[in-house]
Amino acid sequence: MLKRLILVTLLAAAPLHAAEKPPLRYLQKVDGMMTPDQQQTTLFQDKLGAALAHQLGRQVKYIALPRRRLMAALEHGEGDILCSYLPEWLPGAVDWTRAFIPTSEVVVSSPHVKPPATVADLRGLRLGTVVGYQYPELEKIIGNDYIRDDAPTSVMSIRKWRAGRVDYLVTQRSAVNRQLAEGGLPPGYHVLVIYEVKAKCAVSRKSQITVDEVNAVINAMERSGEMAGILKLR
């Protein structure tokens, strides 16, 4: 079992009064050994966590946990905030900020199979998925009429698809973009968008920080242009 890992990093030049307040405990998902894809995601999360903390007049403390522990940590007050999720993906007794992180889920088809024209064409097919992940937008269209081929992590799911062990892969557009930039996608692959939304941050109800405070910070970062620069790191 993956042991809980806590990484404490003080980033950015926080205001002088930041030391008077507890740090912002920023939760991050970890899936074991760090890969290049995860490093890119972590860079985005690091920058977002540091920027939010700075705007809140606090330092930042990163808490890295496996996905199955994230919501429980928020509900029990073991962390303050978790970003890049939606309530449908990670249900729990927390408060959610407004949506601001562009997120797109897609199905990637191998070059040697017929690509689906619509999401409905995925009925009855075996899809590369990640254990513990929910796919509510996919299931709104085809219900449970598909076969899950779970991998322990999203990175391993992509590896299975690239190795030909599964023909259709459900993943995030950002993961596809990284693979494309690194030359990791075979010629002739096909991408079908399942949905495009904007994700949110979950704020613990036991935190000293309120969801209204976080929303105000998000608004300020968007007005200044800082948020746009951070979102480019995804």
Image: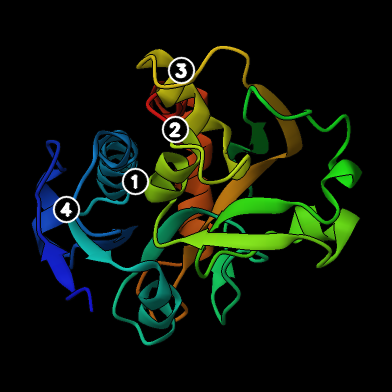
Secondary element at tag 4 = loop
Q: CA distance from mark 4 to mark 2?
A: 17 Å
- Tag 1 residue: 52
Q: Reading the chain from its start, which is encountered first: label 3 or label 2?
A: 3
Amino acid marked by disc 4: Gln
Residue 150: give x, y in percent of width and height: 52, 62
Mark nearer the N terminus (1 vs 2): 1
Q: Are the two marked residues, 3 and 2, in contact with CB atoms closer than 8 angstroms? A: no
Query: Of the numbered discs in the image, which one, if any, rests on residue 180?
Result: 3
In which quadrant of the rendered image does the N terminus lie?
bottom left
Q: Quadrant of residue 147?
A: bottom right
| Crowd tier of the residue under label 1, counting other residues whose Cα lies within 10 Å: few below 14, some 14–19, many 20 or above | many
| Identity of the residue drawn at 20% across and 47% down | 34
Does residue 174 lie above or below 134 as drawn? above
Do residues under tags 3 and 1 come within 8 Å of each other at their CB atoms? no
Residue 221 disc label? 2
Q: Does the CB distance between marks 3 and 4 fall below 8 Å?
A: no
Answer whether labels 1 and 2 touch (C-beta < 8 Å).
Answer: yes
Q: Is residue 98 above or below residue 182?
A: below
Image quadrant containing the C terminus: top left
Which residue in the protein does label 4 denote?
59
The mark closer to the camera, 3 or 1, is 3
Q: Nearer the viewer, residue 213 or 6?
A: 6
- Can you give x and y, in whole percent of width and height, for residue 201 in the image? 50, 56
Outermost residue toward the bottom? 76
Of residue 165 and residue 131, the one placed in the foreground of this image is 165
Near-viewer residue (74 or 196): 196
CA–CA distance between discs 1 and 4? 9 Å
